[in-house]
Image: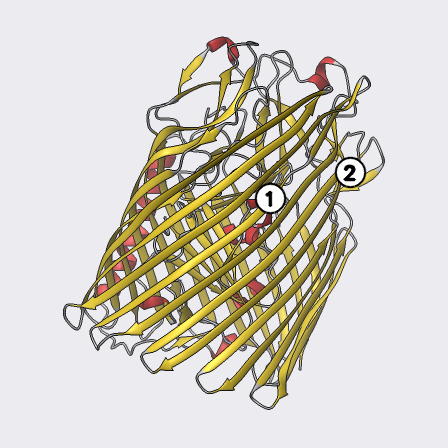
Amino acid sequence: MKPNRNTQFFRSRLLMLGASTLLYSGLTATSTFAQATPTEEGGDSNRAVETIEIEDIIVTAQKRREGLQNTPIAITALSGQTLEKAGIDSVGGLVQVTPSLQFGERFGNIFIALRGIGQAGQDVGSQAGVTVSQDGVPFLNHFMMDSTFLDVARVEVLRGPQGTIEGRNATGGAINVHSAVPTDEAEGSVTLTVGNYSRYGIKGHVNGPIASDKLMGRVAFQVDRANGWMTNATLDTDKNDTNLSQVRASLLAKPTENFSVRTVFEYLKDKSNPAFATVLGRARPDKPTAIEVLDLPVNDLENKIVYMNHTDQRDTESLKAFAIARWDVNEDVAITSTTGFIKHDLVLTDTDNDGTAGDFSDFPLVGIHVKQFTQELTLAADLSERSDIIVGGFYMTGESDQPLILSVPPALNNAFIYNPTEDLDSYAVYGQMRYKLTERLRVTAGGRYTHDKKDFVMDASVIGTPFLNEAGDSWGAFTPRFAIDFIPDDRILLYASASRGFKSGGFNTFGDVSQPVNIFDPEFVWNYEVGFKGMFYDKKLRMGVTGFASDYSNLQQTLFRINPQTGVRYPRVENAATANIKGIELEVEALPFNGLRVMASGTRLFAEFGSFSSIDPIYPELGIKDLTGNRLPQAPEWQFSTSVEYSFDVSNNLELITRADYKWQDDVYFDLFNNELNTQESYGLLNAAVTLATTDMAWSLTAFIRNAFDKRYVSQSLTAASDTTPSRVGQLGTPRMFGVALQHRF
């Protein structure tokens, strides 16, 4: 449902009033400002009551260490301490504190969107418009992207296309996760957690020197267990449980003052079993679901009870190995090499494809197997007091396969067997130069050339009939960026930029195997952006405002066409659309008085498709529908979040820290047809925590609650096409979770 006109008017005036008031107060502030000192951890202190100013945070979004306040791009940077206080333990949790970000899960897939741009399909042939990387190594496939946060130093969320330095298909944005680096300080921590659904967990880290200050090490680990929060009443089992184990070992060697090598080894085993397909209701109001027609048990979503005749077993195993070497040639020149290897395996067995207690269809096996290797070499140099450059090269090779077996009992068990594979070789070179026209005015020009080569094979058997389809193609593109930034005084940064983004073409993995391989071309975007960043009142107030407009062409979308030989509808990924996206983002952080920190963000987003059309599989009798002007999926018009943290001493040795995080978003569509029954209405989520800690933070006890009002909402969904019994299938969001955590730092 859409907000009524009065509600829209109120929201728009509220956002404009808040922005104008803060902007006016900042620009007319009379207090002097000393340039913020950037820190690795960002504006957090172990003792919040001692925080008297907002510190700048070091970011590396442009391949060099610089303060967030001086970086002329739309970026949200969150320190590891902030993530821990907010209870954010994975990429999916970032939506609670990050503007313009959306996240959902469905059928084992990860769906991430920034400013309305995500991905077209849900297989190994799909390309994600938002990239996720860890320690500078981008993940090849979106199945890998809900990265679990273990011992994280900071996370950077870059909004808008990243076609120059980040590259790698980032037409929507990039999420960069940076793990904690070993230091020569001997220290560690351990945290014990218990909660509802019989949750228990332990995590911690140990850090320190191994051989004086030349070799340092850090080991982090976590184990998390919990019963499922959804009940499968048919089998009397639970679903959406937690069974996660993870360990990471890092070494930092500094053989000389100007050369260092950091290695990272990580292993993850996740045997949590989420519900694969939950029937949420009807896909169209005038046609019942199969559950209704056959008088099967109906899911009770409010009480988290479902009826399925399969167990949905999942087993994920991930191995990562990184090496980051840095050579400071002299005080003006540095060379960095980043090498990465990832092996990611996800296996689903006994999967309930129809999501009912009836035995209609199931997946005995769904596998996702990915291996990737990346190598990047970057040179950063100060050419003079006025100019600097960054040049580099990037290479990625990857192998992905997705075996799938589909049964339609009782006569067609294991009758549909698919084994698609895709190989990638990607090369890129990039460069960027910044030049100071004056002491306060700087211009930036950069570009990247990317060449992707892919080979695809589909080896399939459909009811005994073999199919072998092969295809190969390559795509290349030049993606420039131009920017100008101005510092009228030491408190304010103004900037404007124009940049081009590119997302590679590819192959539709699970199209009609009787047809030639569905090849689709790259999509492109030009993004125009203006921004303001300011720090005022003796570093007590920081704010940023970003306005943007993006023009997308050849947008990759999954559409439905008719096989002329059989008359059957089938999905195709086509470069079918253009899209116009524009909006404004606001971020504010304030320290009204000692001990109180307030953070808020908001997004007003306009995201519409240009001219294109498709058959709607839920309403096939309408034929080809004109979808011009439809709203993009995962693109709510309004999105707000606010966090309030207050700390005070309760004795000479104890302090109390309270925190609340609230996120609200407007209605969101999950398909390009804007089906009203495939929509999540507006909702808000409240998280809160209270911590009692010693003043040196050696000991702390935290009581926490997530989704405090136990809101039922849909994370992601689709409408399953059937002429007679269409249904809506998807994934519910996590319900209320609460518990306590005891932490000891040593």
Q: Position of residue 93 (x, y in %)?
A: 56, 52
Q: Which of the labelled discs sits on residue 629, or is there none?
A: none
Q: Is residue 511 left or right of residue 405?
A: left
Label 1: element kind? strand
Residue 178: in sight, yes or no? yes
Pick the residue in front: 422 or 740. 422
**Camera-nearest label, 2 or 1:** 1
Q: Is residue 84 left or right of residue 634?
A: right
Q: Residue furthest right?
A: 236
To which residue does mark 1 refer?
A: 400
Pick the residue in front: 574 or 358. 574
The residue that appears at 32% across and 66% down in the rendered structure is: 390
Q: Is residue 406 left or right of residue 675?
A: right
Q: Which of the labelled discs sits on residue 231, or is there none?
A: 2
The residue that appears at 47% across and 38% down in the rendered structure is: 634
Pick the residue in front: 455 or 183. 455
Please tell me how crowded label 1 is: few (under 14), some (14-19), or many (20+) other residues with Cα within 10 Å: many
Q: Position of residue 667 (x, y in %)?
A: 47, 35
Q: Is residue 668 above or below residue 333?
A: above
The residue that appears at 62% across and 86% down in the rendered structure is: 209
Q: Position of residue 670 (x, y in %)?
A: 51, 32
Q: Amino acid at mark 2?
A: Thr
Mark 2 or 1 closer to N-term?
2
Q: Residue furthest left?
A: 438
Q: Is residue 193 above or below residue 226?
A: below
Q: Position of residue 116 (x, y in %)?
A: 42, 40
The residue that appears at 74% across and 24% down in the rendered structure is: 361
Q: Is residue 287 above or below residue 554?
A: above
Pick the residue in front: 203 or 344. 344
Label 2: element kind? strand
Q: Amino acid at mark 1?
A: Ser
